[in-house]
Image (cartoon, rainbow, N blue to C red):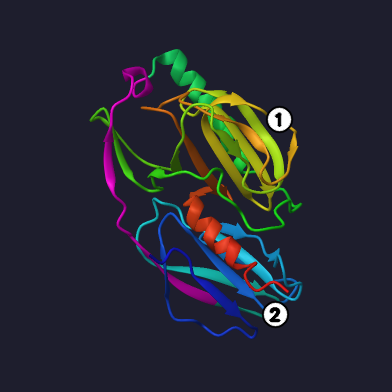
Amino acid sequence: MKYFVVLLLCLPLALFGADSVLKGTAKVLTFSKIPADATLTFGTRHIPLLQHPTDTSKRIALIPVNYRTQPGLKQIRISYKGGGKTLDFNVTQGHYPSETITVAPSKVTPNKKQQERTAREYQEAMKIYATFTKKRYWKQPFIAPMDSHITSRFGTARMYNNTLKSYHSGTDFRAAVGTPVHVTNDGVVVLAKERYYAGNSVVVDHGEGIYSCYYHLSKLHVKKGDVVAQGATLGLSGMSGRVTGPHLHYAIMLNGTQVDPLAFHHEINRLFAHAP
């Protein structure tokens, strides 16, 4: 299945035909030459230009495509002094599966106090994801948080107790309670606490708009502010929060947008494939 498209662009830029990208994934652009003052926009969103991780002569742009994006032709605008170009790409629907899940009624229709709590937790999380850390912590390919069977993939349409419609915003790994959960790349812990839906949670800032999230843990081994190296144990898997059984929910937020985490790993890691 095609999850990402990588383009190698040289200026002056030629207008490319439409490439396809699955909704809920990300588009990675690689530039061999681009003016220092160039800016990228996707819709109303500014997209940062970043240094290529292995080639100092190149720059990259990581563009998340929201799961809720309507399929169809979209555009990325590249502007610079004296000109600009537009890149077309086609967002496709994809063929995400669906599933029905039964959980405690309070996890579908929380009371007023619980609603107030979830609203606070949501705002806290959105403030974190809206923060763009200029420093890059990720300096090597991303790894999986554990070696285990995947039980539910990103994008799966979900019906909770036959009433609440949602979609799966991460990837679930089968994990008995107490299984070590490892951070997927270097970073800084920006959240480590128990939350209503996600249970015991850890969020790690990898820099440059990339955050990894680890939910439903039974124990936390880190605290906010901890600097963690790839492979460090963040905690132990569990079944806290809204779950039907023990597992690890792993997610990636890119520039404030949820994207398929394993597809994101695959594409980011391709940038290291031909490193000298």
Camera-side residue of 251 and 33: 251
Camera-side residue of 36 and 158: 158
Mark 1 and mark 2: Cα distance apart in space:
39 Å
Placement of the N terminus among the 4 image quadrants: bottom left
Among numbered discs 1 and 2, the one appearing first in the sequence: 2
- Residue 170 forms part of the magenta stretch: no
Give the image location of residue 197, x and y in percent: 46, 26
Give the image location of residue 145, x and y in percent: 56, 44
Q: Is residue 27 visible?
A: yes
> Identity of the amino acid at label 2?
Lys
Q: Secondary structure at mark 2?
A: loop
Identified at 36% across, 18% down, the residue is 106
Camera-side residue of 253 and 264: 264
Q: Quadrant of residue 273?
A: bottom right
Residue beneath disc 2: 33
- Residue 104 forms part of the magenta stretch: yes
**Where are the magenta residues, as a range?**
86-109
Give the image location of residue 169, x and y in percent: 44, 43
Q: Which mark is residue 122?
A: none
Residue beneath disc 1: 224
Q: Is residue 56 above or below residue 155?
A: below
Q: Is residue 214 left or right of residue 168?
A: right
